[in-house]
Structure formats: C-alpha cells, structure tokens
Amino acid sequence: MTFSYGVPDPSSYFLPILALGLVATAPAAARVGRALPGRGRSPAVAGALLALALVALATPWLRTGWERRGVYVRHEQLIRSMWESVTAERGFLIWADDMAYRLRAWQILDGEKPGLTVLNPALLTHPQPHREFVRVHGFDPLAGVALPRAGRLGHAGADTVLAGLSGEVARRLNLQSSLPVFVFDPAGPSVRLLRKPTTEPAAPTSTAPSSPLSR
C-alpha cells in the first residue's frame, strides 16, 4: 500500500514500524546478554554497545532530519504568507495538493478566513465529498465530466488527469458562482484571482519567494 501510493520518498511511512523494532531490541539484547559467559556485566556492556551503534547509525539521519526541518519551516512560512494575501471574506480557494489540509487546519483550529471554501479538486472524484459539495453550494462543477477509472491510469496518468481536472474545476467554479475564485500555487509561487467573464482582467493578488519544496 505504501509503495502503491506513489510518493517519491516513502521512508517516513515506515517510521512507526522502525520505532517498534527499536523497542524490541532492548529485551532481545538482554536475552543475548544473559546467554553469554560472565553475564553479570554482559547486559550492561551489550546495552552500551547497542546504544553506541544506534548513535553512530542515527548521526547522519539526524543531520538529514535537521536539514529537512529547515526546508519545511521555510515552506510553512511561504504558505502562510500566501494565505494571508487572500483578503476576500468569501470565495473559493483551489489548491490542487494534499497539503490543502494546512489551510483547512488554520480555518478550523484558528478560526481564520472561515468564509473561504478551500478545495483540493481531487477530492471531488470521491462520492462523499462530491455529494457534500453539491449539497452545500447547490451546483456541481463536475456535471458532465467523464472521469476515467483511476486503476487504469497508473500514477503518471492519474497525475495528468488530476492536473487537467483542477483547471476545469477552477474554470467551472468561476463561471457558476458569483464568488471570487483563487488558484493557490506555491510552486509558482502565486495566488491568482480568476477573471470573471464580465470583468476586466485581474492581476495576481500576490507573489512570493521561490518555494523550497519546488526544487
């Protein structure tokens, strides 16, 4: 399941299993120590050697983890600055990425910009979120859109279909609703206000420094 999800670096998905494995090393080391000659000091010696080995193995990973933390902190700052640039009290904000949950978290936990509907268009391909959207907003941005079965696409095909779907959902939302529609794109980076058919072209509401995750 982890590999089928298609993420480029699946190592973080195995961290819980690795943590359980490390917990299991302590009793295993104790059993080995009791089985060795001179076992009065063997458990302590084995434990010390195991601790040194773990420190040696963890050192490069700790450095990597610290570097990644810096990348994520900078990315969080970028997302925050883009989020704060949207001043509309009501509207749709489209971010075609799983990380759209960050904006929803700020809405739910911090009460920020409650009038904005944050939407990852990929969610509309699932029945329950699709029905809920239609119930709340009274129109269907996927009406008449034929969606191929995901199992037949493969990862690359699915990414292509979802990219096209995101643009189509944004276009339809902009036509079907009188509310402003923003396209959130940290890779640009930009927050783009879509032009309504009867209004003058609108410039992007913000630009920001390059996203550290887009390298």
Image: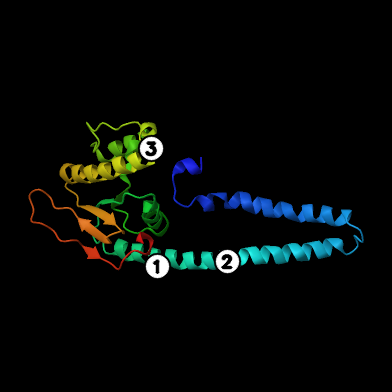
Rendered position, 16 above or below 79: above
Residue at (48%, 68%) from the top-left corner?
67
- Residue drawn at (26%, 40%), measured in percent from left and top? 137
Residue 114 lies, in percent from the top left, at 32, 54
Q: Amino acid at mark 2?
A: Pro
Label 1 with label 3: CB-CB less than 8 Å: no
Disc with the residue nearer the chain's start (1 vs 2) = 2
Secondary structure category for the residue under label 2: helix
Q: Which-is-in-front pick, marks 1 and 3? A: 3
Residue in view at x 53 percent, y 52 percent: 11
Give the camera-side residue of 183 and 163. 163
Q: Which residue is mark 3?
A: 154
**Label 2 belongs to which residue?**
60
Indicate which disc, 1 or 3, sits on the residue closer to the N terminus: 1
How far separated are the C-alphas under marks 1 and 2? 22 Å
For marks 2 and 3 on the same chain, the one whose residue lies earlier in the sequence? 2
Q: Position of residue 138 (x, y in %)?
A: 24, 37
Q: Position of residue 180 (x, y in %)?
A: 19, 52
Q: Amino acid at mark 3?
A: Gly
Secondary structure under the numbered disc 1 in the rendered image: helix
Image coords of residue 105 (percent x, y): 41, 55
Residue at numbered disc 1 = 74
